Amino acid sequence: MTHLTHEYIKALFDYLPEGNLLRKIKTGQTTFAGQIVRGQSTSTGHVRLKIHGGTFYMHHVIWCWHHGTWPTYLDHINNNPSDNRIENLREATHTQNMWNSRGRAGKTGIKGVVWEKAKKRYRVRMRANGKRLSFGYFKTLEEARIAVEAARTTYHGEFARHE
């Protein structure tokens, strides 16, 4: 089985509010009803589980359990890929998911802000709607931080991540 249906997921599992699944039936030699599904952690911190020969991300299974649909992309709102509570999950595009990811802050410690040695100023740039946008040069790092956070909020909305 390579795809799970909502009905099949509901037959196999109950959802626990801390973001786990509880087995409802025995499905193998070592899997029993009443067990919390642990899955396997990936290198990125996501949890994968095997169900009847297929491998699935836990957050996708939990989403389908709640909403009855199989998502293309899900975003962990708090950026913790092992926190699979339903209130921490939201549908997103790939781009929105990337906006909420931890960015590469570089030498300034703020993503989207770089020091321009020739101008002796901090430059603010970011990507939005498939384009690289520039928001100017600033004397202080604090001014640049404020500018990039305002730009992220404007262009990335609820998916803006300021760190």
Image (tube, grey):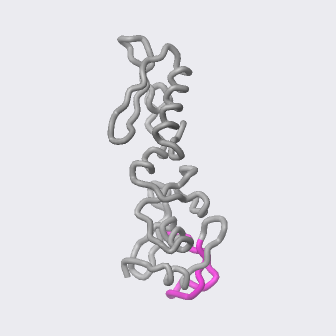
Q: Quadrant of the C terminus?
A: top right
Q: Judge left or right: residue 50 versus residue 150.
A: left
Q: Residue at x 49, y 83 (%)?
A: 8
Q: Quadrant of the N terminus?
A: bottom left
- Given the current orientation, which residue lies at the most extreme front position? 154
Counting every numbered tag in the picture gives: 0
Q: Residue at x 53, y 71 (%)?
A: 67
State the residue in front, 59 or 33. 59
* First to last magenta residue range: 21-40
Report the predominant secondary structure element of the magenta stretch.
loop
Q: Residue at x 38, y 26 (%)?
A: 134
Q: Judge left or right: residue 23 versus residue 47.
A: right
On the image, the x and y values in percent for residue 51 come to 45, 78
Q: Residue at x 52, y 37 (%)?
A: 153
- Given the current orientation, which residue lies at the most extreme left position? 131
Q: From what the image shows, is residue 40 above or below residue 45?
A: below
On the image, the x and y values in percent for residue 16 come to 65, 71
Q: From what the image shows, is residue 103 above or below residue 32?
A: above
Q: From what the image shows, is residue 115 above or below residue 51?
A: above
